[in-house]
Amino acid sequence: AARIPLQDGRNRSQMRAVINVALGKGYERGQLRLGRSLGQHYRFAFINFQVWPPWDHSKDTPYAAKAAAIQYAITQGYTTVLWLDASCIVAGDLTQLFEDIERDGVYMPSSGYNCAQTCNDKILEYFSITRDQAELIPDAATGCFGISTTHPKGIAFARMFIQAAKDGMFSRSRSHGGQSQAPRFLCQRQDQSAAGLICHHLGIEKHDFGHRCGYYPKTTPTQVVQFKGIS
């Protein structure tokens, strides 16, 4: 792990960090680009791994590394944690985004799908949600999301997200893979599927995709994180 303490990520009573795990050379290049873009704007701690963070559970899916990284950051005393995919670049000051996380407990954009489309039978059963209920639940977009452990919803989300990873809910194929016979089901989205259902359980409203984070190039002045892809 390389933890880069930049200027004052330890903002008084808050300790703020951006986190990322890059498993593979392409992701490592994206992680390096992410770190450079972060350094060009207001500086926060950047916790980045090129191997698995400490994790005494199954490593059969890289998506569980997100939960492992969140768990690690919390054990290191960080109270506000922002996960950014290696496909992201930072395009502006993240202060307002961190303040959004601390105000709401969780920052979670919506993908535009619903959970009936992105949750297999196994994960719906795990969270005790029917597919009819799932159709009314917006799917999450976990390429850019954050939690605050100074907020009860942030604490609850982190616990449920980490436990779902430990219980194997991030492990199934990203293709349809016959994981449900329901005609509404399109494909499983691992951590994203879990995050959408957890937000529903906790009464967490998802944020508009495109407001704080969106696709490259930047289309709104409020966008401070952009998904640029990894070539």
Image: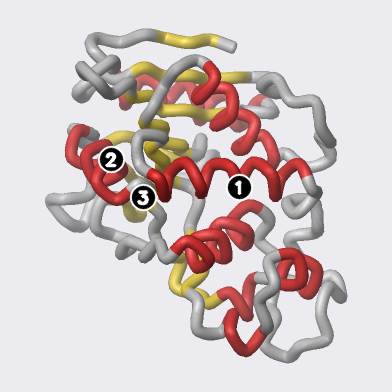
42 vs 167, left or right, is left
The residue carrying pointer 3 sits among few (fewer than 14), some (14 to 19) or many (20 or more) residues within 10 Å by Cα, namely many
Nearest to N terminus: mark 1 or mark 3: 3
Nearest to N terminus: mark 1 or mark 2: 2
Front in this rendered view, residue 195 or 154: 154
Residue on which the image places disc 1: 161
Can you say whether 56 is above or below 82 in the image? above
At x 40%, y 45%, the residue is 152
- The reply to whether discs 3 and 2 touch (Cβ–Cβ < 8 Å) is no
Residue on which the image places disc 3: 107
Mark pair 1, 2: CA separation: 18 Å
Q: How many marks?
A: 3
Q: In which quadrant will I find the N terminus? A: top right
At x 36%, y 31%, the residue is 80
The type of residue carrying mark 1 is: Phe
Spot occupied by residue 107 in the image (x, y as percentages of width and height): 36, 50
* Mark 3: secondary structure: strand
Residue on which the image places disc 2: 102
- The reply to whether discs 1 and 2 touch (Cβ–Cβ < 8 Å) is no
Spot occupied by residue 202 in the image (x, y as percentages of width and height): 47, 61
Mark pair 1, 3: CA separation: 14 Å
* Mark 2: secondary structure: helix
At x 47%, y 41%, the residue is 155
Nearest to N terminus: mark 3 or mark 2: 2
Spot occupied by residue 78 in the image (x, y as percentages of width and height): 41, 22
